[in-house]
Image: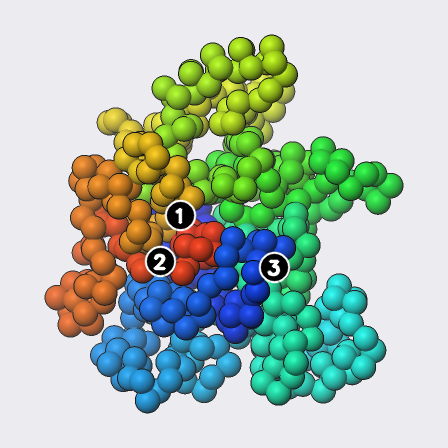
Amino acid sequence: MEIKVTSEIGLLKKVLVHSPDSGIGKVIPSKAQDWLFEDIVHLDTIRRKEYDYYTKLLLYFLDPELIKGKLKTIDAPRNNYNFYKPGKKDFHNSRNVIEIQVLLSDILKNATIKQKLVASVCAIENCSYKIQELLLQQEAAELAKIFISGTGNDLDMLFPPVPNFIFTRDIGIVINDHIVLNKPAKKARLREALLMKYIFFNHPLFKDYKDRIIELEDSPYHFLLPVDADEYNVTLEGGDVMVVSKEHVIIGISERTSLAAAHQVATILFKKNIVRKVTLVQIPQKREYMHIDTLFTQIKKDTWVMLGSFSKKRAQKELDDAILKAIEDQKPETVTTIIQFKKEQVTRPVYFNSLEDLLTDISKKDLKVKGPVKIIHSGNDEFPFDLREQWTDSCNLLALKEGVVVGYDRNDKTLEAFRKAGFSIIDVKELLPRLESGAQTAEKLQNVFITIPSAELSRARGGFHCMSMPLLRKDI
């Protein structure tokens, strides 16, 4: 299988996903924030009335022969929606919309890998010897389910679920033809990182890329340092990495990705000649920002969506505020530090005054845009809608191809801003029948924002950019 990603907007050909599993339905209020959820969600709604629409849309774009002409049968209640449930006989098992649980089940059929992974998971979760023996007795498909949801068909909860596994962007990122594995900042995501490491190194799909998998290493003697020694901790999540061109990668330094990790990734990318330009974007370490893809994503070569607080106009005001607040030894909430390094001139970095300046520079210099660059703002840049809708991932959009993006239906003011910028807004419930009948084709869609129901999904704190790990995009 070919793996290659050279942009954020090239035609999506293969993507790694994970459908909401039963573990999400077991999150309780007292543990929600420990497991990085803001609230508990309703499993049946998040599956059938929201995420399943996302799956259908991906299949119509990436693997249409699996779904076209079969939609009514697939969605018939008598079939119990098994088409969308990994591990079921009727699961779609697409070669292009690739389900993590299926890959995990595949590698667990190997007795050696199974034994190693059971031992590793049990060590992380502090399981008893008895539970370890019990896990070794499970069939591969059942064990894969247990590793993700924390329980099996006839078992009590053995350990916590990993409800954030639906956010596949964070577990790794493809940069050109290399794969960078994450190092999670939060304990709740350690098992995800372990499972994905075994998948990438052992599944046949990735056999040609073993030498192109990049693992980050902890700083020497990190175990002697205080837990809060942030400048030495190496943590990275994929939501803080954007491949904006074949030669240029943006790395965010955030609540989840450390300066030490960003430095290490940049050094490796230069050393291996994977890219020639790396931009570091340091954002405030705040829960509502989390990753850089909660603040901006790319729509077209000349178009971006962004939280207005990081615009050029606001940046100047924040700079003025910073001078005043520095006297009081306080930090403004939205000041960013943006530094760009080129491989040939690494000792002469370029600084940007605002995120808007950086995005404009990328469009002009990397993507050769001749005309004006458009910045569409969250909430139409109107307070308080800008901040409310950024919280519900108005800036966290997935481009299926240039100019065709997927996002939540609830961000009304942001959708209004897209209309003003010349985009059509199409509800997925209206689009799917048109794709099914042939009245509309994925190839002919242009300048479209596809909305998906989001009452429950948005409470999980991630958008469709988070819920996708592109493995292959067509070069732009």
The x, y position of residue 463, in whole percent, is 42, 52
Query: At 25% from the left edge and 61% from the top edge, which residue is drawn?
Result: 428
Check whether the beta carbons of the residues at disc 2 and disc 3 lie within 8 A of each other.
no
Q: Quadrant of residue 372?
A: top left
- Residue at numbered disc 3: 30
**Callout 1, which amino acid?**
Thr
The residue nearer to you, when weighing 408 against 11, is 408
The x, y position of residue 462, in whole percent, is 46, 52
**Callout 3, which amino acid?**
Ser
Q: Quadrant of residue 285?
A: top right
**Callout 2, which amino acid?**
Ser
* 416 with respect to 401 (left or right): left
The residue nearer to you, when weighing 88 against 93, is 88
Cα–Cα gap, marks 2 and 1: 9 Å
Q: Is label 3 in a helix, a strand or a loop?
A: helix
The residue nearer to you, when weighing 352 against 392, is 392
Check whether the beta carbons of the residues at disc 2 and disc 1 lie within 8 A of each other.
yes
- Residue at numbered disc 2: 454
Between marks 1 and 3 in the image, the one whose residue lies nearer the viewer:
3
Query: At 75% from the left edge and 38% from the top edge, which residue is drawn?
Result: 228
Query: At 29% from the left edge and 53% from the top edge, which residue is drawn?
Result: 409
Q: Is label 1 in a helix, a strand or a loop?
A: loop
Q: Can you say whether 207 is above or below 352 in the image?
A: below
Q: Earlier in the sequence, mark 2 or mark 3?
A: 3
Q: Can you say whether 62 is above or below 247 in the image?
A: below
- Residue at numbered disc 1: 392
